[in-house]
């Protein structure tokens, strides 16, 4: 028996983003055992970034289920190209949200190690997108993905009316 789509998406959320944004940062903080960045009261801006990242990730999961008829898991990917919701502004809002949450955690816990980890995660995401996801989406969705890619930026969220450059 195959689990419902929503259940499969929640399982993946716990496995992948949960590990990247919760488990590994927790381990880093346990190893670090102390603060390493003096960010003053700015550390509480980390709560805003952390909350924004979590909300955006959840929104993206819902769009993958409703519009894409799949999950973010590569083995259970959407069967339709998702271009609605936050995907109108940036092609990779889920990755942006995870890195945003990690930056928020680094500020909140004043951890230079978490900030370095966030940078490393972004590099891995960028390579994954460039080397695996974009070629896969191009093969799967063809011209519709090409048009979407030409219109919507990869990393920097931009309202459609403000776009003045070709999205990479």
Image (cartoon, helix red, strand yellow):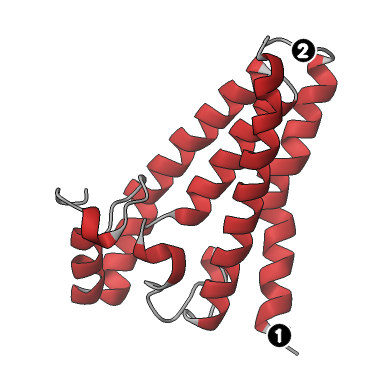
| Circles 2 and 1: CB atoms closer than 8 Å | no
Residue at figure coordinates x 66%, y 32% from the top left: 46
Q: Nearer the viewer, mark 2 or mark 1?
A: 2
| Residue 2: x %, y % from top left | 71, 86
Up-down relation of residue 148 to residue 165 (above or below): below
Q: Residue furthest left?
A: 165
| Residue 116: x %, y % from top left | 57, 21
Residue at figure coordinates x 65%, y 32% from the top left: 45
Residue matched to label 2: 35
Residue at figure coordinates x 48%, y 81% from the top left: 67
The quadrant of the picture occupied by the N terminus is bottom right
Q: Is residue 72 visible?
A: no
| Residue 132: x %, y % from top left | 38, 53
Secondary structure found at label 2:
loop
Up-down relation of residue 156 to residue 132 (above or below): above
| Residue 159: x %, y % from top left | 31, 57
How far apart are the two marked residues, 2 and 1, measured between alpha carbons? 43 Å
- Mark 1: few/some/many CA within 10 Å (<14, 14-19, 20+): few
Kindly indicate the quadrant of the structure image that contains residue 82: bottom left
- Mark 2: few/some/many CA within 10 Å (<14, 14-19, 20+): some
* Residue 91 shown left or right of residue 63 in the figure: left
Residue at figure coordinates x 66%, y 52% from the top left: 54
Q: Residue furthest bottom?
A: 1
Q: Nearer the viewer, residue 130 or 81?
A: 81
- Numbered label attached to residue 4: 1
Between discs 2 and 1, the one toward the N terminus: 1
Q: Nearer the viewer, residue 135 or 63?
A: 63
């Amino acid at each position: 028996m195959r689990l419902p789509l929503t259940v499969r998406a929640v399982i993946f959320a716990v496995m992948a983003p949960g590990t990247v944004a919760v488990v590994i940062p927790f381990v880093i903080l346990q190893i670090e055992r102390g603060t390493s960045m003096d960010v003053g009261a700015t550390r509480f801006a980390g709560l805003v970034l952390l909350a924004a990242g979590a909300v955006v990730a959840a929104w993206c999961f819902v769009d993958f289920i409703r519009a894409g008829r799949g999950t973010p898991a590569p083995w259970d990917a959407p069967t339709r190209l998702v271009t609605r919701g936050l995907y109108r502004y940036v092609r990779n809002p889920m990755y942006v949200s995870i890195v945003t949450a990690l930056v928020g955690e680094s500020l909140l816990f004043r951890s230079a190690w978490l900030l370095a980890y966030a940078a490393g995660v972004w590099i891995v995401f960028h390579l994954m997108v460039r080397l695996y996801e974009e070629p896969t989406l191009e093969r799967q969705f063809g011209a519709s993905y090409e048009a979407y890619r030409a219109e919507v930026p990869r990393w920097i969220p931009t309202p459609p009316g403000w776009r003045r450059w070709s999205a990479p």
